[in-house]
Image: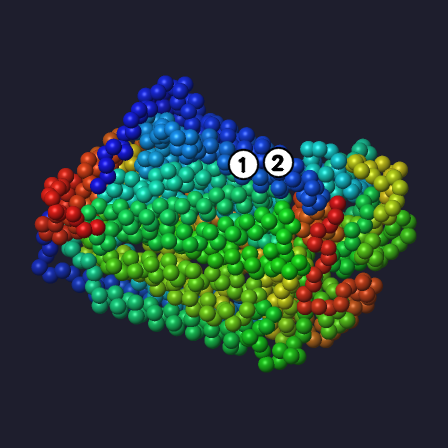
């Protein structure tokens, strides 16, 4: 049975551990934070192909910068403790001082973490409703964070089905195409829905992600800033070819888009007349095929 | 200690055997492949779609079959074609129509001339309600809807492989194969009877209504 | 307190011949019973299913499979002897109480109500399924070494992913509650048993069955949904999903029962003198976990049952075109799913805060704050679940609220770090293997927790949802957190449970390999997710090929480190068997004042607790309990 072992003989003046840790922490923050923000930061995805992806990028860099002092505190403190507060080798096991708590430190910690958390929540909310107009995320059928020109946005319906993305342009005779093309510099409203199971429409470089849920019209806004192609992937497990449900979209100039959509309407005129009328959601029948 | 060591070795051997069984008998099981037959500079692939496979203990599902170089029908959906070649595909379609969930897939896409031939007559858009299956390779932009046999046709096939004397439609099309790689293909008609949305069972199983095109 | 007469029943049956042991209720008959039950249930189900058009059309009889698995469960339990006590009592005969056997290795293969036997049975079961799930992870990483070409076909790959995830979640939910909770809680509070010993044994055997039922999915066509079982894909899937539904339901029942057992034991059976202030922090961790388990697991059961109904009697809970909604599944599942991840995390907190004082030789700093933190986490965990659905098309009004509550939960979680930091201040650290794992816990959980901050911020969530970033986040918190803590607990308490030392050198090799390769495996996955790799895919952008090859190589080395653990366990516990002694770690805690391994009746007499277990460095501190108290009339000892 172990009784309280002897407390170590301490030198008269205990080294100022707290001060040392504080200095190391400050050094860490001052060195690493700029490195993170200036060197790593610009490469943190998503980059700036759209207004929404740019805003996500700013949020990601900000969060990374805020994370640095927290990581620094824990790493420096634990590292210092592991290096300095050690049991002497050999001999009987010696106990440390019997400290059980300090309410001032506890209250201070609680206060500081609460302030940080409230700040983060406010920052996130402001970011969500600010210039990014929803940050490219799916907002459901009644989006709150709408751009000012939402009523004039180009509507594109994204239809997820097992295992292909198709896109309908209601403003262009409801033509459906397996290719996604957007005009640059214009607000686009994606209406994401599904015909069968849950998928998730992820336009990577544009920073758009909205789940495709059958019976749900999930609206996400994007405004592309540069022309070029972007990857489209499915981000919700939907069965066998979930990982292969990939395609490439393109952002064109406004003139290029106009030419493309006209050509597409001509090419698919034959099948467009068979399509059901454009609707926010579809309920294909029947639910189960008979044998 | 010797006895215990032997016991440990015995248990370890059994566990390793189980792991190897799992790996080779379940995980890396690769179905056989059928190669397109070369003829006069084009490669020919001959397939059939059947309404019920009919060979227990395998499930009694709709399925694709491929004809190998000896003229025998194989129950596989892995098809090998040469690279950068014109490939002519002939599909004997023995199943009745189910109808497309998304009528867009009634459009013929990605073939030579943008058309396919149904019983000898070219078409570019099928009536979606007549579709029984499709042969779609999304990564190549290739999609051909396959017309169904009439519901009241006589001599409907019930066990694969189906002979050409049974009621069927014939669809042919030609496409140019890309560079080497593996490209998935699938049917888009929700033809899996009884499953929700018609997309379960064979529609989610390689070897039935899904497969791969291996371009070498 | 406890009457001695319940300890060795009259006509105790140990010492029976090998043949007699073989023929009695044990795991062999459980397997036989399960097989017979499956056959009977399957036959009845097929007769019913023959009249349901959806079952005949699909040529896959879910009714038969589900009834078969249900009857297999009953057969399994009968084979173990769970029905014998109620049956004998109903027939008016005295029960044989073989389950109270006290000696012999056969106890470990059957229903035994000794909580220590149940703890060790749980340990073996959890470790076995942990390795099975880990093996599947190795196959996943093997497949991901190539960007396109598959050596595991796409459908089978999804089953492997689902097996890995579901097996790990199922087993790790009970990973601490089962082995360490059942073994240690009575010892730590000074009791001779758990409150409900037969229920305790039931939870173990349901867990073992659940593991095997999940593996049977391989024979039923696999399942494509991963561990989250999203409907409507679950409604549509092949027969393997029935195995997933039944096994997860069994675990849900088991979790709820374990939780009830632990709460009841701690509330009612503490030894005299064990005030709430002296309850070890590990026990507090398990109590808060148990509250979550009891409240959340039934919701899972309801959701799974709805999928069963959709698949068998053609209801449409989750089918939008027939009036249902996939959101119903999303919300029900995550209402369970979020407390579930805290069921995983809280025991980890309990273990590391229990171990730190012993090897820092200082009291646990901020004991009350730690307890409050755990309760705060438990309470808040019910209010955050919609953060899994930020981009799913939920009502846009909900998103700021759930962002706030999710950020809020980082406050009580952070308190654990404050406790650790306070305990380490001016400590005298010994770097034993348990302490190494406990320190690594904080390194890993920091990264895991901070990545959660990104995920809780809605604009950042749009970048990272459904990608490998989420994968890295939860592997850092669950594996880097709970599994490292479980390793710490293993190395710390296995000498007490078995009486044998675990080899220190092998332990250190295991630790360093696991720590280094764990970080090398999962840290790059944050980058993979940010670079656009979705979850659960076997084919990805070829630009990410080198990254994935690197991660797979590190993962194989991580798997190798687990083999070191396995070798350590086999070597130390089966082959070498060096005695550990009563208190090799020189801990003040009550369980370390007992012989190793702990004798059947735990305490010779119920002790009287005289101080808390963390009074290191207190001059003249009394031992934690008087093991042979003088009982004086009138001295009751406040509970």
Residue hosting label 2:
C44
Q: Earlier in the sequence, mark 2 or mark 1?
A: 2
Give me the residue at 27% from left, 37% from top: C496
- Where residue B180 appears, as percent x and y from the top left, is 69, 47
Q: Is residue B51 left or right of residue C615?
A: right
Which image quarter is the N terminus of chain C in? top left
Kindly give the residue lying farthest to the right in the view shown: B120
Q: Chain of mark 1?
A: C
Is B139 left or right of C139, judged from the image as shown?
Answer: right
Residue B9 relative to residue B206: left or right: left
Q: For this rendering, which residue is in front, C343 or B8?
A: C343
Give residue C524's position: percent from left, percent from top. Answer: 46, 54
Helix, strand or loop under label 1: helix
Q: Could you say where residue B179 lies in the image, as x and y percent from the top left?
A: 71, 49
| Residue hosting label 1 | C71
Q: Position of residue A50 (x, y in %)?
A: 58, 71
């Amino acid at each position: 049975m172990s009784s309280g072992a002897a407390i170590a003989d301490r030198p008269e003046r205990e080294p100022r551990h707290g001060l040392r840790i504080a200095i190391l922490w400050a050094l860490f923050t001052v060195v690493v934070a700029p490195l993170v923000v200036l060197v790593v930061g610009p490469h943190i995805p998503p980059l700036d192909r759209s207004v929404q992806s740019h805003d996500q990028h700013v949020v990601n860099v900000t969060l990374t910068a805020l994370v640095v002092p927290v990581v620094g505190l824990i790493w420096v403190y634990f590292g210092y403790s592991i290096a300095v507060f050690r049991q002497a080798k050999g001999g009987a096991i010696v106990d440390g001082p019997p400290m059980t708590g300090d309410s001032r430190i506890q209250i201070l910690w609680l206060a500081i973490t609460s302030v940080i958390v409230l700040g983060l929540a406010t920052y996130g909310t402001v970011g969500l409703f600010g210039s990014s107009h929803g940050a490219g995320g799916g907002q459901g059928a009644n989006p709150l964070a709408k751009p000012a020109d939402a009523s004039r946005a180009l509507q594109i319906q994204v239809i997820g089905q097992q295992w292909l993305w198709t896109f309908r342009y209601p403003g262009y005779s409801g033509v459906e195409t397996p290719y996604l093309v957007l005009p640059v510099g214009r607000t686009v409203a994606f209406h994401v829905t599904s015909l069968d199971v849950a998928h998730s429409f992820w336009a990577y470089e544009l920073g758009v992600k909205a789940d495709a849920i059958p019976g749900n019209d999930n609206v996400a806004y994007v405004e592309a800033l540069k022309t070029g192609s972007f990857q489209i992937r499915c981000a919700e497990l939907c069965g066998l070819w979930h990982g292969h449900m990939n395609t490439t979209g393109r952002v064109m100039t406004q003139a290029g888009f106009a030419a493309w959509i006209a050509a597409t309407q001509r090419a698919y005129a034959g099948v467009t007349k068979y399509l059901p009328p454009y609707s926010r959601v579809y309920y294909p029948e029947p639910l189960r095929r008979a044998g | 200690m010797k006895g215990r060591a032997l016991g440990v070795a015995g248990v370890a051997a059994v566990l390793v055997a189980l792991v190897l069984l799992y790996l080779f008998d379940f995980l890396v099981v690769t179905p056989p492949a059928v190669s397109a037959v070369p003829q006069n500079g084009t490669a020919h692939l001959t397939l059939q779609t059947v309404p019920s496979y009919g060979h227990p203990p395998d499930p009694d599902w709709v399925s694709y079959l491929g004809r190998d170089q000896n003229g025998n029908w194989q129950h596989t959906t892995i098809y090998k074609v040469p690279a950068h070649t014109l490939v002519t595909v002939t599909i004997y379609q023995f199943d009745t129509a189910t109808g497309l969930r998304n009528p867009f897939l009634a459009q013929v896409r990605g073939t030579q001339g943008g058309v396919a031939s149904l019983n000898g007559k070219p078409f570019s858009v099928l009536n979606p309600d007549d579709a029984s299956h499709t042969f779609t390779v999304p990564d190549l932009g290739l999609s051909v809807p396959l017309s169904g046999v009439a519901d009241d046709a006589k001599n409907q096939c019930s066990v694969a492989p189906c002979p050409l004397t049974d009621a069927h439609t014939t669809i042919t099309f030609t496409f140019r194969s890309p560079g080497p790689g593996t490209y998935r293909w699938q049917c888009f008609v929700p033809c899996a009877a009884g499953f929700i949305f018609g997309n379960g069972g064979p529609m989610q199983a390689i070897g039935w209504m899904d497969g791969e095109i291996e371009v070498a | 307190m406890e009457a001695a007469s319940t300890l060795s029943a009259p006509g105790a049956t140990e010492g029976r011949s090998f043949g007699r042991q073989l023929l009695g209720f044990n795991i062999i008959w459980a397997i036989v019973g399960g097989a017979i039950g499956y056959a009977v249930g399957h036959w009845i189900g097929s007769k019913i299913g023959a009249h349901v058009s959806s079952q005949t059309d699909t040529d896959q009889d879910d009714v038969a499979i589900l009834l078969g698995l249900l009857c297999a469960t009953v057969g399994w339990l009968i084979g173990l002897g769970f029905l014998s006590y109620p049956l004998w009592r109903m027939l008016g005969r005295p029960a044989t109480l073989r389950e109270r056997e006290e000696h012999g290795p056969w106890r470990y293969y059957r229903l035994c109500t000794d909580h220590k036997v149940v703890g060790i049975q749980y340990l073996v079961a959890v470790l076995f399924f942990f390795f099975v799930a880990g093996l599947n992870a190795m196959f996943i990483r093997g497949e991901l070494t190539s960007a396109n070409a598959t050596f595991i076909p796409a459908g089978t790959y999804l089953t492997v992913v689902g097996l890995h995830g579901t097996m790990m979640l199922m087993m790790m939910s009970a990973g601490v509650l089962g082995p360490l909770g059942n073994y240690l809680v009575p010892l730590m509070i000074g009791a001779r048993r758990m409150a409900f010993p037969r229920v305790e044994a039931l939870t173990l055997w349901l867990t073992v069955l659940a593991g095997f039922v999940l593996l049977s999915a391989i024979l039923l066509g696999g399942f494509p949904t991963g561990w989250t079982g999203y409907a409507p894909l679950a409604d549509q899937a092949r027969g393997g999903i029935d195995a997933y539904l039944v096994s997860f339901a069994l675990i849900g029942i088991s979790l709820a029962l374990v939780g009830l057992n632990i709460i009841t034991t701690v509330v009612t059976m503490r030894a005299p003198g064990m005030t709430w202030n002296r309850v070890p922090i590990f026990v507090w961790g398990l109590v808060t976990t148990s509250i979550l388990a009891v409240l959340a697991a039934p919701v899972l059961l309801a959701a799974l049952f709805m999928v069963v109904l959709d698949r068998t009697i053609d209801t449409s809970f989750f089918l939008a075109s027939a009036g249902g909604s996939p959101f119903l599944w999303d919300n029900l599942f995550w209402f369970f799913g979020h407390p579930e991840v805290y069921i995983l995390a809280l025991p980890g907190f309990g273990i590391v805060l229990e171990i730190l004082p012993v090897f820092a030789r200082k009291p646990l700093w901020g004991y009350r704050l730690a307890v409050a933190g755990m309760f705060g986490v438990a309470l808040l965990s019910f209010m955050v679940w919609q953060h899994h659905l930020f981009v799913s098309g939920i009502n846009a009004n909900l998103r700021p609220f759930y962002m706030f509550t999710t950020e809020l939960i980082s406050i009580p979680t952070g308190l654990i770090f404050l406790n650790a930091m306070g305990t380490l201040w001016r400590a005298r650290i010994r770097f034993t293997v348990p302490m190494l794992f406990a320190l690594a816990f904080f390194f890993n959980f920091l990264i895991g927790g901070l990545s959660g901050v990104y995920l809780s911020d809605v604009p950042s969530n749009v970048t990272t949802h459904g990608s490998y970033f989420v994968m890295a986040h939860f592997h850092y918190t669950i594996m880097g957190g709970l599994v490292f803590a479980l390793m710490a607990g293993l190395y710390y308490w296995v000498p007490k449970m078995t009486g044998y030392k675990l080899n220190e050198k092998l332990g250190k090799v295991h630790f360093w390999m696991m720590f280094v390769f764990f970080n090398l495996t999962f840290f790059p996955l944050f980058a993979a997710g940010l670079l656009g790799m979705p979850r659960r895919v076997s084919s990805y952008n070829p630009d990410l090929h080198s990254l994935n090859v690197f991660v797979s190589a590190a993962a194989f080395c991580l798997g190798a480190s687990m083999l070191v653990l396995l070798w350590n366990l086999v070597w130390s516990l089966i082959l070498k068997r060096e005695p550990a002694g009563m208190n090799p770690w020189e801990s003040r805690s009550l369980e370390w004042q007992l012989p190793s391994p702990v004798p059947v009746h735990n305490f010779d007499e119920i002790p009287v607790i005289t101080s808390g277990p963390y009074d290191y460095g207190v001059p003249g501190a009394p031992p934690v309990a008087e093991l042979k108290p003088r009982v004086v009339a009138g001295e009751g000892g406040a509970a």
